Amino acid sequence: MTTTRRLVYFEEWMDPVGPEMAAGIAATEVVRLDQRADPDTLWPVLAAAHGYQLRPSTETLKIFYPNAEFLGRCPELLAVASAGAGYDMVDVDALTEAGVLLFNQTGANSESVAQHVLAMMLTLSKQLIQSDRAIRREARDWTRWDYTGREVTGKTVGIVGLGNIGRRVAQLSAALFGMRVLAYDPYITDADFAERGAERMTDLTEMFAAADFISINCPLTAETRGMIGAAQFAAMPRHAYFITTARGGIHDEAALAEVLAADGIAGAGLDVFEAEPPAHDHPLVQFDNVIVSPHNAGVTVDCNHNMAVSAAGQWAEVFAGKRPRNLVNPDAWEAFLGRYHARFGADAAE
């Protein structure tokens, strides 16, 4: 039995304020690890850890992904925190079965990601990338009329996932550009749709057919993997744009490349891919009407700070025996209570 709460992380948090705040939590020891170190020196430290603060999946070696094998080597672990809102690198079922809590930083990145969506909307509709590339080329086989854009004013945006990010996309689109907002989200109520300023769509393909812009803002889960494919892309109007800042794997990349090659849609904005970063010769980066970014929609100075503060605040809750506000797996709570008492000799409390 110990009174010290040990929290480990690899290399860095999203912002230095995270470990600084965590170090100020009562009876907490914060340990920084380096993934490049000898694993034989890392595993004993991880085995004694009560908390594990994740880095993003693209910056974490797979041997340190929280899954059943990892948990078997970390018997003291009580909770895991994702770096941001997503947690597709985590085996949630394994954590729940072991009584290990998982919490994320949902909401902390909503402003930055929503602004990225709007930036892609504007860049695509105004053909900014195409005209920039043309001006930089030596050839002058074009005129400015070749890059005639469209306004987004009064257009229709269809949002998949009306959570923290999706609702902010809805708010900004409506407030700034007077856009009509449609949304598909089977997990919230009609009252939620009304409060978040969106018209409820119950058929995903029908929404794709009705929108000028599609924005993907849902998490990658077993249910959403491969949810968007050829049928949805085929339904889109030829002048429409597809934008995703969610996760690779939700949409079928080959199907998107096919519809773009056939001029079936006007273009796409892609912040995420199944394999990141995508290869330089990936089919989707060959199109002039596709803009890409390296999964950095939520990587801003402001967002990094907000996510680090969110995580540190929730670690204070967990180490005090309280339920973190963004608990992903509430079914683990009862088992967590017993584990917490066994390790610290104190009862956790709601």
Image (cartoon, grey):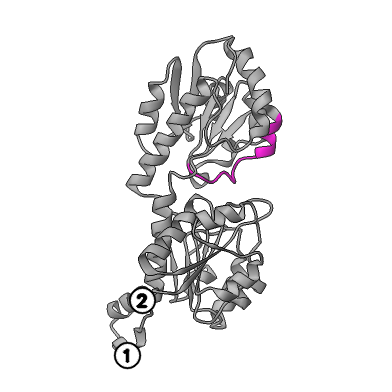
Task: Residue under label 1, please give it.
Answer: 141
- As for residue 89 lying within the magenta part, the answer is yes
Task: Residue under label 2, please give it.
Answer: 126
- Looking at the rendered structure, the kind of residue marked 1 is Asp
Asked if residue 3 is positioned above or below residue 114 in the image, the reply reads above
Q: Measured from the top left, where is residue 289 in percent x and y?
A: 44, 76
The residue at 51%/41% (across/down) is 60
Asked if residue 68 is positioned above or below residue 154 in the image, the reply reads above
**Magenta span covers which residues?**
84-97
Quadrant of res 151: bottom left
Asked if residue 147 is positioned above or below residue 332 in the image, the reply reads below
Q: Measured from the top left, where is residue 217 in percent x and y?
A: 53, 57
- Looking at the rendered structure, the kind of residue marked 2 is Lys
The residue at 40%/69% (across/down) is 178
Q: Are marks 2 and 1 in contact (CB under 8 Å)?
A: no
Asked if residue 127 is positioned above or below residue 74 in the image, the reply reads below
Mark toward the viewer: 2 or 1: 2
Q: Is residue 167 left or right of residue 207?
A: left
Is label 2 in a helix, a strand or a loop?
A: loop
